[in-house]
Image (cartoon, coloured by chain):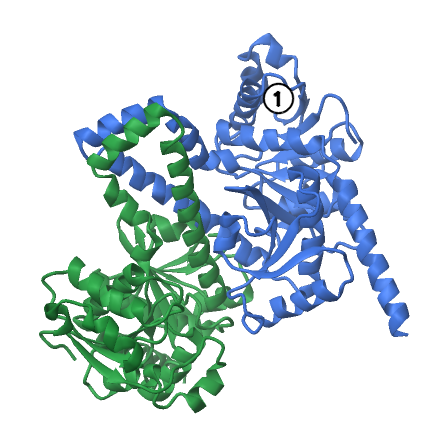
Chain colours: A green, B blue
Amino acid sequence: MTRTAPIISVDAMGADNGPSIAIDGIYHILKRRPATSACFLVHGDAVQIEPLIAKLNPEIRGRITLHHTDSEVRMTDKPSEAVRRSRGSSMWNALTTVKNGEADVVVSAGNTGALMAISKVVLRMKKGVHRPAISASWPTPRGHTVVLDVGANVECGPSQLVEFAIMGEAFHRAVHGSETPSVGLLNVGQEELKGNDTVRAADGLIRDAGLKFNYKGFVEGDDISLGSTDVVVTDGFSGNIALKTAEGTVKLVAHWMRESFTSSLTAKIGALFLRMGGLDHLRAKLDPRSINGGVLLGLNGMVIKSHGGTDGEGFATALGLGIDIAGSDFLAEIEANLTRLKEANESRDETAS
Amino acid sequence: MTRTAPIISVDAMGADNGPSIAIDGIYHILKRRPATSACFLVHGDAVQIEPLIAKLNPEIRGRITLHHTDSEVRMTDKPSEAVRRSRGSSMWNALTTVKNGEADVVVSAGNTGALMAISKVVLRMKKGVHRPAISASWPTPRGHTVVLDVGANVECGPSQLVEFAIMGEAFHRAVHGSETPSVGLLNVGQEELKGNDTVRAADGLIRDAGLKFNYKGFVEGDDISLGSTDVVVTDGFSGNIALKTAEGTVKLVAHWMRESFTSSLTAKIGALFLRMGGLDHLRAKLDPRSINGGVLLGLNGMVIKSHGGTDGEGFATALGLGIDIAGSDFLAEIEANLTRLKEANESRDETAS
């Protein structure tokens, strides 16, 4: 649903460093986006959170509604345990407000496995999707590449990869605005002979699905950052490794840059001019906190997973993503794509019989 | 074998852009390393290559011995075809000179699958290794992380990952000089519960192998660039995706940097100072051609695979790696590690019986 003011449901107990991260995040996102009318339903331990809210200015306080919860999902909980024991936790309650229509989207920095499992129970999967996928929007010189799955499903069959393609295509159109997003399947080589059995089978399935898709076939790891296709589909094992490797590489290059900028007096003077001339923009781009937030796709509701170890600035990025997608119609786009797949399958079956 | 002057056997017909890449590469590496006494056995079509050599100065010409070949392995050849038809090709002959002891190491930019298959036939595998792995040495703030496999084996069982760990550990000690290199297994999370069946089984096998190994357990994608462990072990599918993603990310950051340095007059002045104050060093680090060259491990001989699409500067980097490893004893180190594994297995079997 779309409201004039997006309502973000926040699981305040998920971050590794406690509820101050979520409250700090709200402070930072409202500073970054002074024009937003977003409001926040904060779920968590009132004893810890009330003093944090009390320190904020009245304008920000007015955007927050606190819902006390007695329990929380721990990082060590296995998904199955979490589902059994999490009723009434900050994560469960945050998801329930989205289910009930009180909020548009959930943001949680909690345990990924538990968030997926509890989301499935509370929000339920869309018909035709087997498990949620986590999508990341990776910056490129031309916009964003949507990469999925980046860690929800470590082992995926070919038909799951087809579901990811459909959901990623819909998500890119709804959130990043391409009319007909191009889709690639991550592999180790562009020749059709290369790759493992699963990606070869998925490639065949996507081609045969009868969807009028802008499908480009196989892409390689460097195509993610180049933006060769709008969507890159992969299993959660390779996708997570690609995402983390890219994050590590950005950190490495930032380290080299700092080293180079302080290597001599002349370099230091140069860096000073650069700082005056727009270096902060580059620095912000290289800040890992500027790309925090994976969207769970395939559910009847919008859920964002933040890094567990993030700080307030990073959590604010995930909240900003929440504000952006709250106003998008990506759930409807995914629904439409799933219907297209179903119809294509049916008409193919009819032709075959 | 180690000679005073390393002898590099060059497959000059492998690069996408023809034999000029290899000859250019020799020119650039001798310019970069004026002190080296390396000599080059160049294998390829004399009609194309002689005029290229004729243009070089006499000092460089004196380092090159040309061996004419009538045929070459094509990028489109399947490995099995290549093995049948490649006798007498530049790739086959380059490998044969290493087998015969006429050269220390082969450098080829040819078809990866064919290079692996022909290497296996000409040089043979070390006892106890099933298939060659390709290792890449990735720069970190603390030195180099050896990542393997980066594309030779798209599907790997747990025992193959153990072989990679053993070979990578030996390679790091011999080439990058750690006394007891630390080894990590690439996964999607550090908790032992996470990951797929193969990495969990490999983790158990490495722990149980009885090797006195500095094994650190699971690492994640960002650990590669951080240098958290000296060696990162993974299957060729994930490894290739990680390597290519890192390459793409470096290109993206370099693009942002150029954008930032030219975004205003003040920034341009800053960039000018930086150029005078050591920016070239950073620029060289960000140049993908500065990290070209994967080493095939597991063979009775040293083989380096260069990117097919590289230019002379990039091929020179692969030749430089050849010069470095020609003087190392990594084959003996791998041999020693394989013996340790065999002994550990035998003593465990005895204890069990």
Q: Quadrant of residue A318?
A: bottom left
Can you say which quadrant of the picture contains the N terminus of chain B?
A: top right
Name the residue rendered at 35%, 76% in the picture.
A13
Q: Residue A165, percent across and down?
A: 36, 68
Residue type at mark 1?
Ala
Question: In this figure, what is the number of numbered marks?
Answer: 1
Answer with the quarter of the image where residue B115 lies. Answer: top right
Q: Residue at x 19, y 85 (%)?
A: A101
Q: Is residue B275 above or below residue A126?
A: above
Give the camera-side residue of B96 and A153: A153
Above/below status of A1 relative to A304: below
Tell me if A9 is positioned left or right of B208 in this view: left
**Residue of label 1:** B46
**Toward the viewer: B227 or A51?**
A51
The quarter of the picture where residue B121 lies is top right
Point out residue B117 in the picture as x, y percentages from the top left corner: 68, 48
Determine the residue positioned at 49% across, 72% down. A156
